């Protein structure tokens, strides 16, 4: 079975080990959640790499002695001991089994299913098409279950932060309804989170990129003249972000840090750059300039407000509902250590993440095209307008303009862009020029 998994897992969008050589896949635990045909098992596996490191992943695998239905052939791993094995998230039978356990609050061997609200176990399930670092199952048009793929031992920040905000009455998060826990390295670990499915909502990325397409289609208009201008929504998103940050300071740990925090931040930024240079040699051109920006952060002596933050904030993590903006996925960057994702840090990291996302939205249509100076100019104009609108909304909500912390904000933007270069180098090499161009702009502004 693990041989099949070792061949299959590198091809999955949510697999975080791309660019490394897998040397082993071992089963840490396996729990039968449906004992029928197909039989459905929830597995935690340990993936080992040639550099001596390893990662844990959650799999939902089904096996059957019969032929696999045509609609499931794309999910097939292969044959093991006379049974066909496939990725069960694509099978409504398997997704219904998960929902049944969540609705019943069952204990299944080492798995604990917990609910905070009544759950309709009869809703049909389907896998959401947009695969990212996790897998989402939608039930009817009422519920969505996020299946965490890459696992680290301990409490997942997503449920911890979202529940704290929802309990405090925030209108900008989706209330946790149920979840299930297992064990990783002997420690209780969240494996899945069930929340309301926000019908009729639109994700921020789709809205922003539609606005960019509108702009490109109007050759003689500026960004503020196009019918699909996004700046109003960007400002409202900035205000929602500021309100969430303010509430997080109230209901979760926060502190005021001094010069030691700035020095530690600069060290961390340099360490991340060092690691990225091993993967993306093209960064070397800007490395000295980036380190100069980080050195300025290290000399900072003013107090820094630190708190829990989102940690992986971009336009794909927000939904526009009829009532306003909702923020999703508070687990932080899955590739970062859990201790880092739960650490107190400046909320400007989230602001920087969203500012980078506006740049990406502006450039995405140009990433794989021949460079056209006229479109690059228009994309930059769109990004500047929406970045400023977001900061305006944020400043109004928190009473402080993030642009006044230009040195710290630029350093965090550079750090995010460095992270993006590694992702693009491993997953979409043709897009690498997008974060590299942003780095060039940012270090040019600092010069």
Image (cartoon, rainbow, N blue to C red):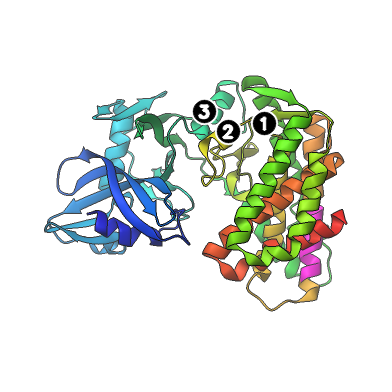
Asked whether 402 falls inside the magenta stretch, the response is no
Given residues 270 and 310, the one toward you in this image is 270
As drawn, 195 above or below 93: above
> Which range of residues does the magenta coloring cover?
376-386
Q: CA distance from mark 3 to mark 1?
A: 14 Å
Where is residue 279? Give x, y as percent: 58, 62
Where is residue 221? Give x, y as percent: 83, 67
Q: CA distance from mark 1 to mark 2?
A: 9 Å
As drawn, 8 above or below 115: below
- Residue extending farthest to the bottom is 370
Which corner quadrant holds the C terminus? bottom right
Given residues 336 and 242, the one toward you in this image is 336
The answer to whether the residues at label 2 and label 3 have Cβ atoms under 8 Å apart is no
Mark 1 or mark 2, earlier in chain: 2
Which residue in the structure is indicated by mark 1?
244
Q: Secondary structure at mark 2?
A: loop
Which residue in the structure is indicated by mark 3?
160
Which corner quadrant holds the N terminus? bottom left
Which residue in the structure is indicated by mark 2?
173
Point 86% across, 56% down: residue: 445
Q: Secondary structure at mark 3?
A: helix
């Amino acid at each position: 079975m693990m041989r099949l998994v070792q061949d299959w897992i590198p091809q999955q969008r949510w697999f975080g080990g791309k660019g490394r050589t897998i040397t082993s896949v071992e089963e840490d635990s396996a729990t039968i959640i449906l004992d029928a045909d197909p039989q459905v098992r929830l597995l935690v596996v340990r993936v080992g790499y040639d550099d001596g490191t390893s990662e844990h992943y959650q799999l939902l695998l089904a096996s059957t002695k019969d032929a696999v239905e045509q609609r499931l052939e794309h999910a097939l791993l292969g044959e093991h001991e006379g049974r066909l094995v496939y990725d069960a998230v694509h099978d409504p039978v398997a997704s219904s089994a998960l929902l049944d356990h969540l609705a019943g609050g069952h204990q299944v061997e080492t798995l604990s299913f917990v609910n905070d609200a009544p759950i309709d176990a009869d809703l049909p399930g389907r896998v959401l098409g947009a695969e990212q670092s996790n897998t989402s199952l939608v039930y009817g048009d009422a519920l969505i279950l996020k299946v965490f793929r890459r696992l680290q031992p301990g409490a997942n920040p997503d449920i911890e932060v979202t529940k704290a905000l929802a309990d405090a009455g925030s209108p900008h998060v989706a209330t946790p309804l149920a979840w299930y826990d297992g064990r990783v390295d002997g420690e209780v670990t969240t494996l899945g989170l069930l929340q309301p499915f926000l019908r009729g909502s639109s994700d921020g990325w789709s809205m922003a990129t539609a606005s960019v397409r509108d702009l490109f289609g109007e050759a003689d208009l500026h960004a503020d003249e196009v019918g699909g201008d996004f700046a109003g929504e960007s400002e409202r998103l900035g205000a929602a972000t500021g309100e969430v940050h303010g509430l997080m300071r109230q209901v979760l740990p926060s502190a005021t840090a001094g010069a030691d925090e700035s020095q530690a931040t600069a060290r961390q930024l340099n360490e991340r750059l060092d690691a990225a240079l091993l993967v993306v040699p093209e960064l070397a051109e800007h490395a000295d300039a980036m380190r100069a920006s980080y050195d300025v952060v290290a000399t900072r002596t003013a107090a820094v407000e630190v708190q829990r933050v989102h940690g992986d904030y971009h336009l794909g993590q927000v939904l526009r509902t009829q009532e306003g903006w909702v923020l999703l996925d508070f687990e932080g960057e899955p590739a970062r250590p859990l201790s880092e994702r739960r650490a107190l840090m400046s909320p400007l990291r989230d602001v920087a993440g969203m500012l980078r996302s506006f740049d990406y939205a502006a450039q995405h249509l140009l990433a794989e095209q021949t460079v056209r100076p006229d479109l690059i100019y228009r994309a930059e104009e769109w990004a500047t307008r929406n970045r400023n609108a977001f900061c305006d909304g944020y400043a109004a909500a928190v009473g402080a303009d993030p642009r006044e912390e230009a040195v710290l904000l630029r350093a965090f933007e550079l750090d995010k862009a460095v992270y993006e270069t590694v992702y693009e180098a491993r997953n979409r090499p043709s897009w690498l020029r997008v974060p590299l161009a942003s780095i060039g702009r940012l270090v040019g502004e600092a010069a």
